[in-house]
């Protein structure tokens, strides 16, 4: 039997990352798959205004710290939420406010540095030496982080190749998703996405009966793709005080899975929609994500030695 642990969308949460590393031992996994959306979405300056005084104001309310220890404690809180932190003088913060190019440059530097530090911890923790770690970007991730993943020897970068999970099953991957309101780095039309998916499936040896597809976008109307409906101002549509949900997954992913019927579809992208479903013979699963509160969500998947036996799987959080 080969045991997989599939999790996704950690968005730079250091607490979720530490739990991802621990999952190998905790669930006795042979392969840990961290699939999609690795980087954070915000950065927080810690502004130094004196020899022993700093402040931050991420929510518009100023919080003062009077020692380096307090600064480190507060930084850890934000890092666990997936926010990037840095120290600066008031003049530097003002320059960042008025200089978008410099702000973007700093954001990219923090993205790359944080991901590099996190992946370096694989060698510094008790992550079992015999366990395979697969790390894949997602649609929210800029292309400049890919070389950071590639430099780490303990990490398998799965894009544009077929990766053997064990002696019987291969993994193919596509990090692109169908169009979103956010204009993320790795999205494209459904027509182009279908072509990308088919090209990835062609990389695998043999048939698709034992193929595992890491497609970041979940299939359309599968129960894995329910997200709040947004109005023209990108605000949630409400009905009697409750958000209205709609299916936002990919029709191309649904079509390709129906046609090729792989063994598994491993998805993510839609944080609010943890679920699994069968499309024909294919089991599709989205663990969901609660990275903001430091909770890891994942699926433990047991692949039997006999391919004719049933795949077992269950969702875990913690």
Image (cartoon, rainbow, N blue to C red):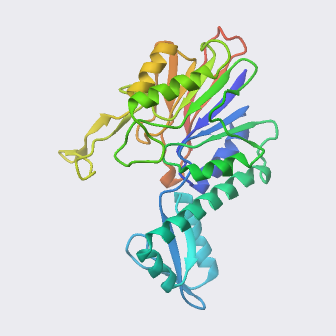
In the rendered image, which quarter contains the C terminus?
top right
Residue 175 placement, left or right of 117: left
- The answer to which quarter of the image holds residue 70 is bottom right
Tell me residue 91's x, y (percent).
49, 85
Tell me residue 71's x, y (percent).
58, 77
Residue 28 placement, left or right of 255: right
Going 23% across and 47% down the picture, which residue do you hit? Answer: 231
Farthest-out residue, left: 240
Determine if residue 223 is in view: no
Going 56% across and 59% down the picture, which residue do you hit? Answer: 80
All told, the count of numbered labels is 0
Tell me residue 283's x, y (percent).
52, 20
Q: Which residue is more in the foreground, 251 or 221?
A: 251
Farthest-out residue, right: 129
Q: Which residue is more in the foreground, 46 or 318?
A: 46
Going 57% across and 77% down the picture, which residue do you hit? Answer: 87
Q: Is residue 45 above or below residue 258?
A: below
Determine if residue 150 is in view: yes
């Amino acid at each position: 039997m080969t045991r997989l642990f599939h999790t996704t969308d950690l968005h730079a949460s250091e607490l979720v990352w530490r739990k991802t590393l621990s999952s190998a031992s905790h669930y006795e996994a042979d392969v840990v798959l961290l699939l999609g959306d690795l980087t954070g979405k915000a950065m927080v300056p810690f502004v130094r205004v004196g020899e022993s005084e700093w402040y931050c104001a991420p929510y518009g309310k100023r919080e003062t710290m009077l020692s380096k220890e307090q600064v480190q404690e507060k930084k850890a809180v934000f890092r666990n939420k997936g926010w990037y932190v840095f120290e600066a003088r008031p003049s530097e913060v003002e320059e960042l406010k008025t200089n978008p190019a410099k702000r973007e440059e700093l954001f990219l530097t923090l993205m790359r540095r944080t991901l590099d530090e996190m992946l370096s911890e694989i060698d510094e923790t008790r992550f079992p030496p015999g366990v395979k770690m697969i790390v894949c970007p997602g649609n929210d991730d800029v292309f400049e982080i890919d070389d950071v993943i590639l430099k780490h020897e303990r990490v398998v970068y799965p894009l544009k190749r077929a990766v053997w999970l064990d002696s019987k099953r291969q993994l193919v991957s596509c990090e692109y998703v169908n169009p979103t309101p956010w204009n993320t780095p790795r999205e494209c039309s459904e027509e182009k996405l279908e072509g990308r998916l088919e090209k990835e499936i062609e990389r695998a040896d043999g048939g698709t009966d034992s193929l595992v597809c890491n497609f970041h976008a979940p299939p359309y109307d599968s129960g894995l793709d329910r997200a709040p409906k947004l109005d023209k101002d990108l605000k949630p549509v409400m009905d009697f005080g409750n958000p209205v949900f709609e299916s936002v997954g990919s029709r191309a992913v649904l079509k390709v899975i129906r046609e090729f019927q792989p063994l598994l579809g491993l998805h993510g992208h839609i944080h609010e929609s943890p679920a699994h479903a069968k499309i024909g013979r294919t089991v599709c699963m989205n663990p969901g994500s609660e990275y903001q509160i430091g909770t890891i969500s994942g699926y433990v998947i047991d692949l039997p030695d006999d391919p004719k036996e049933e795949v077992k799987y269950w969702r875990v959080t913690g």
